[in-house]
Image (cartoon, helix red, strand yellow):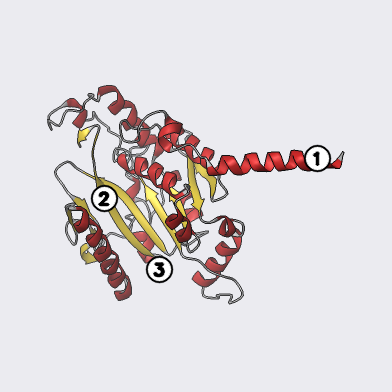
Amino acid sequence: MSKYYIILFLLIHTSIIGQSQNLQTVDEFLGYELGSRFTFHHQVVDYFEYVAENSDKVQVQEYGKTSEGRSLIVAFISSAKNMAKLESYQIANLSAANGYAKPELEQLPIVWLSYNIHGDEAAATEAALATLNDLAGDDEKINAWLDEVIVVIDPCENPDGRDRYVMWINQVLNIPSNPDVDALEHHQPWPGGRFSHYLFDLNRDWAWQTQSESQQRLKLYKQWMPHVHVDFHEMSYQSSYFFAPAAEPLHENITEWQREFQVHIGQNNAEKFDKEGWFYFTKETYDLLYPSYGDTWPLLMVQSDLRMNKVVREQQGFR
């Protein structure tokens, strides 16, 4: 009889392995091509949970609820062997961040990716979906990279504002989209999707933490203290792509090393953009003086932060 249990175990185990290696792509899961329309927040959560349930490289944690009851989630992504001891890496990093590193604990770089704090900059969450799709796949280069890093994705910091925008844009969007800047699809009605349920700009609340979304997010953030924080936004139709280094003035507590690190990363980004022929700009418009932006506050928490802005020319035309 025991041999039948062994066979049954092997069949189940093989089935589980097959599921993890044959994940649906994000397009297959959603039922439409990513970027052809905007995705509601519950669909985003569903996809993240689906990947976590079927991949040993991904774990999803709900860290709170919005004022309207939507889930606030993050995904942790790394190699399977790293995910098996994720808590150990967390403890090691917090120990080092608090000044009492434990040599016996192995550390890994932790990169935190934050998307869509302004709800109507909705391409950011679509980019988060694409990022998870790629990281959870079987690309050998990506898998080798995940051996060396832990990635944290917060796909939408402002789900209430995002869904307000997505409901509207999916109703008025022309197929194909209308590139005329005066078209209705480029002029959302008041109050728009930028703000939270209480019409608060959450990207002004990182330091003050007056809003429940900020409080819940930063409680989790401080439990990890990532080495790098990337703040993803979306540009208007009139602008190209912005990335660090930031414009002057910079807050006086931002260190010279942090300035140099922003330049280093910016140069790397510039090489990639030049290769593709994409337009971009740096050191203009977006400063680091105000301490409560999503790029300033993490820097003042002694991490390295980068602001990335995405200009979108997708199915909705120019925004």
In the rendered view, tell whether residue 21 sits above or below residue 247.
above
- Disc 2 from disc 3: Cα separation: 22 Å
- Disc 1 from disc 3: Cα separation: 54 Å
Looking at the rendered structure, the secondary structure element under dot 2 is strand
Q: Compare residues 54 and 204 and report the one nearer the observer.
A: 54
Looking at the rendered structure, which numbered label has been put on residue 302?
3
Q: Amino acid at mark 1?
A: Tyr
Badge nearest the viewer, 2 or 1: 1
Give the left or right position of residue 1, taking residue 226 as reference: right
Give the image location of residue 184, x and y in percent.
18, 26
Looking at the rendered structure, which numbered label has been put on residue 5?
1
Looking at the rendered structure, the secondary structure element under dot 3 is loop
Picture quadrant where residue 301 is located: bottom left
Identified at 57% across, 55% down, the residue is: 80
Quadrant (top left, top right, bottom left, bottom right) of the N terminus: top right
In the rendered view, tell whether residue 257 sits above or below residue 318.
below
Q: In the rendered image, is residue 53 in sight? A: no
Identified at 56% across, 68% down, the residue is: 92
Q: Amino acid at mark 2?
A: Asn
- Determine crowd level at label 3: few under 14, some 14-19, many 20+ residues with C-alpha closer than 10 A: some
Q: In the rendered image, is residue 202 in sight? A: yes
Give the image location of residue 101, x and y in percent.
55, 75
Give the image location of residue 250, x and y in percent.
24, 66
- Disc 2 from disc 1: Cα separation: 54 Å
Q: First in sequence: mark 1 or mark 3?
A: 1
Q: First in sequence: mark 2 or mark 3?
A: 3
Residue beneath disc 2: 309
Q: Amino acid at mark 3?
A: Val
